[in-house]
């Protein structure tokens, strides 16, 4: 049978105005269990002082869902929120990093903790994080060697050219990862990304040859003169540029 008084208390904690909420939290504090406290955190009139009073009760603060609710509430004192961040699950850390209602210090703490955990996570978990993470987390994930993780990262609406470009222009990116970026309809049309792909020796030949016709003459000449690149790439760039002497074979 449902505990009707408890259900009523939960409803009132969720819907009460500020004065009634303060009175309920004080007068009926012994009746407030985890479920009731969760409803109080949903009340828009919950204040900093009320949150501190709730979190002072060991029976409530020991519950994960209450610690999570506290971290995600804008009125929670910053030191208290920071205290609970390290214990959050990775999925909640992802949400925390992109919740613009919260103080940047709290969001950065969530990002830092999440980045620390990345090496121990499975590929599927990293893919989920790549799709929803903050720019700071994306900057850490861009170096992942798994093409599937990078492919998921490319779907994230928070990804910017500034975050992606160091990956494409870097020396550590694998051919598989660069092929994923080159195949992206959204990102391969960005001119700086396109140039970086063509200038990276690890980009697969087929991908580079498909991108070269869309480069400007100055960049084509730079590709043609880059001795790090494969000869077919340099010759194609020279032909498209339509000027200068043909590059000599070095690779």
Image (cartoon, rainbow, N blue to C red):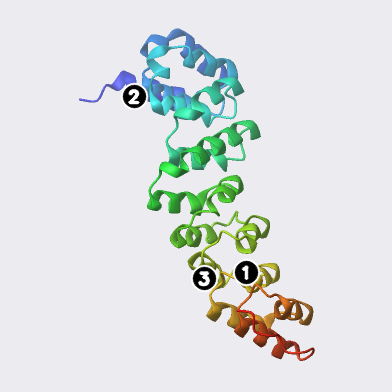
Residue 73 picture location, percent across and down: 54, 29
| Mark 3 vs mark 2, CA separation in Å | 56 Å
Q: Which residue is mark 1?
A: 200
Label 2 near label 3: C-beta < 8 Å? no
| Mark 2 vs mark 1, CA separation in Å | 63 Å
Asked if residue 28 lies left or right of residue 246, the reply is left
Q: Residues within 10 Å of mark 3 (few under 14, many from 20)?
A: many
| Residue at (59% x, 25% y) in the render | 75
| Residue at (36% x, 13% y) in the render | 31
* Sequence-wise first label, 1 or 3: 3
SS assignment at label 2: helix
Q: Which residue is mark 3?
A: 179
Nearest the viewer among 225 and 127 is 225
| Mark 1 vs mark 3, CA separation in Å | 11 Å
In the picture, the disc for residue 7 is 2
Nearest the viewer among 6 and 65 is 65
SS assignment at label 3: helix
Q: Residues within 10 Å of mark 2 (few under 14, many from 20)?
A: few
* Sequence-wise first label, 2 or 1: 2
Q: Residues within 10 Å of mark 1 (few under 14, many from 20)?
A: many
From the image, which quarter does the N terminus lie in? top left
Residue 171 picture location, percent across and down: 60, 61
Q: Can you see residue 183? A: yes
Between label 1 and label 3, give the one nearer the viewer. Answer: 1
């Amino acid at each position: 049978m449902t505990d009707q008084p408890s259900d009523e208390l939960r409803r009132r904690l969720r819907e009460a105005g500020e004065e009634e909420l303060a009175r309920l939290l004080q007068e009926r504090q012994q009746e407030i269990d985890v479920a009731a406290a969760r409803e109080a955190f949903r009340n828009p009139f919950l204040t900093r002082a009320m949150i501190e009073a709730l979190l002072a009760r060991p029976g409530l603060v020991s519950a994960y869902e209450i610690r999570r609710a506290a971290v995600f509430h804008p009125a929670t004192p910053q030191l208290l929120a920071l205290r609970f961040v390290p214990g959050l699950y990775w999925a909640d850390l992802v949400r925390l990093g992109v919740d613009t209602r919260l103080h940047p210090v709290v969001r950065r703490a969530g990002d830092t903790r999440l980045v620390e955990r990345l090496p121990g996570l499975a590929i599927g978990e990293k893919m989920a994080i790549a799709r929803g993470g903050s720019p700071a987390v994306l900057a850490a994930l861009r170096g992942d060697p798994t093409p599937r993780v990078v492919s998921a990262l490319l779907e994230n609406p928070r990804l910017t050219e500034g975050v992606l470009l160091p990956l494409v222009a870097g020396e550590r990116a694998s051919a598989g990862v660069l092929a994923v970026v080159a195949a992206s309809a959204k990102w391969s049309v960005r001119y700086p990304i396109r140039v970086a792909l063509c200038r990276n020796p690890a980009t697969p030949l087929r991908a580079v040859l498909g991108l070269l016709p869309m480069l400007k003459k100055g960049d084509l000449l730079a590709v043609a003169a880059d001795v790090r690149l494969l000869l077919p790439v340099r010759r194609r760039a020279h032909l498209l540029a339509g000027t200068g002497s043909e590059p000599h074979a070095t690779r």
